[in-house]
Amino acid sequence: MGDKGTSNHTDVTDFILIGFKVRPELHVLLFLLFLFVYAMILIGNVGMMAIIMTDPRLNTPMYFFLGNLSFIDLFYSTVIAPKAMINFWSESKSISFAGCMTQLFLFALFIVTEGFLLAAMAYDRFIAICNPLLYSVQMSTRLCTQLVAGSYFCGCITSVLQTSMTFTLSFCSSRAIDHFYCDTRPIQRISCSDLFIYKVTSFLLSGIIILPTVIVIVVSYMYIVSTVLKIHSTEGRKKAFSTCSSHLGVVSVLYGAVCFMYLTPDSFPELSKVASLCYTLVTPMLNPLIYSLRNKDVKEALKKVLEKKNIVL
């Protein structure tokens, strides 16, 4: 026990990100895969934000939230992807203590913010379908701004707590993080601290984050389904459900990937990396596609932009 106290996090200046345990010749393939996915994220999310900001028809609460969702997706993937791609070519694969702490802080900030933002988007759809006559009054610009600001505030508070708890742990021997970015679970594995209090606190913190957002989403859609089933016309039902399908798709992809990642046992770290890849890079790539393919307004706005470009050419 005495040896464990002789070296703590203050002696650690950097970590090693092991990444994917594959043959060296496959690093080029992984680099190209990451590059392609990240390029799609940049094009999709920057394009979505540009369309929302330039098309007056998309100046509504739903697209205000969607623009923020694209911003979050763009930045939390940027926290992960460039460093992962650099490490495919790096011999050392090191990341500084401050860099690791910053990466975890920013990723936690954006991923938690996205969870709360998706709950706000579910509430927006609930008001739009269940109280359409009061929609413009209830979903005012002020309320939308407050909901987005509140999402960032919750994300920031959670990130500060999670990051401070993680980096006050002691690291006595190994600096090698068995992951492709700095995340809480792989960092726990190289700590020699007693993790009982840490794990209980992390579990409670996760519950405080996940339960309210899931409850808002589930309750909102219970009311939405109940309201839609009362609509007599098939066309009316189809139109009502079509406004929710994109949001449900995004929620399913994100929460499905996160649950899969955190339910994966520690004894299968490679499977955990694949699950992490789903919600750190695949989800931000899919979100703009889900909204552009499933949303009539976005498709029309995109068509208008492409027609303008053809005229210019």
Image (cartoon, rainbow, N blue to C red):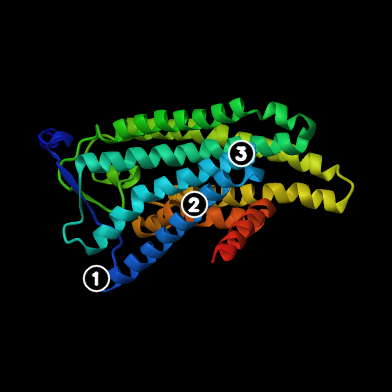
Evaluate if marks 1 and 3 touch, with contact meaning CB atoms under 8 Å apart: no
Q: CA distance from mark 1 to mark 3?
A: 43 Å
Q: Percent from the top left, x then y, of residue 267? A: 35, 55
Label 2 packing within 10 angstroms: few (<14), some (14-19), many (20+): many
Q: Which mark is residue 24?
A: 1
* Residue 119 position (above or below residue 278): above
In this rendering, does residue 146 appear at all?
Answer: yes
Q: Nearer the viewer, mark 1 or mark 3?
A: 3
Q: Is 204 on the left-hand or right-hand side of 225? A: left
Q: Earlier in the sequence, mark 2 or mark 1?
A: 1
Residue density around tag 3, few if under 14, some if 14–19, many if 20 or more, within 10 Å? many
Judging by the rendered image, the residue that carries numbered circle 3 is 121
| Tag 3: amino acid | Met
Please identify the quarter of the rendering in which residue 167 is found: top left
Q: In this rendering, would 233 be left or right of 150? A: right
How much space separates mark 2 and mark 1, taking CA atoms? 32 Å
Which one is in front in this view, the residue at disc 2 or the one at disc 1?
A: 2
Q: Residue at x 15, y 34 (%)?
A: 10
Q: Which of the marked residues, 2 or 3, is nearer the chain's N terminus? A: 2
**Element on which disc 1 rests:** loop
Dot in front, 2 or 3: 2
| Residues tagged 2 and 1 counted as in contact (Cβ below 8 A) | no
Residue at (39, 30) in percent of width and height: 201
Q: Which mark is residue 70?
A: none
Which one is in front, 49 or 274?
Answer: 49
Give the farthest residue toward the bottom: 25
Residue position marked by numbered label 2 in the rendering: 45
Q: What's under tag 1, amino acid-wise?
A: Pro
Whole-percent x, y for residue 100 in the image:
26, 43
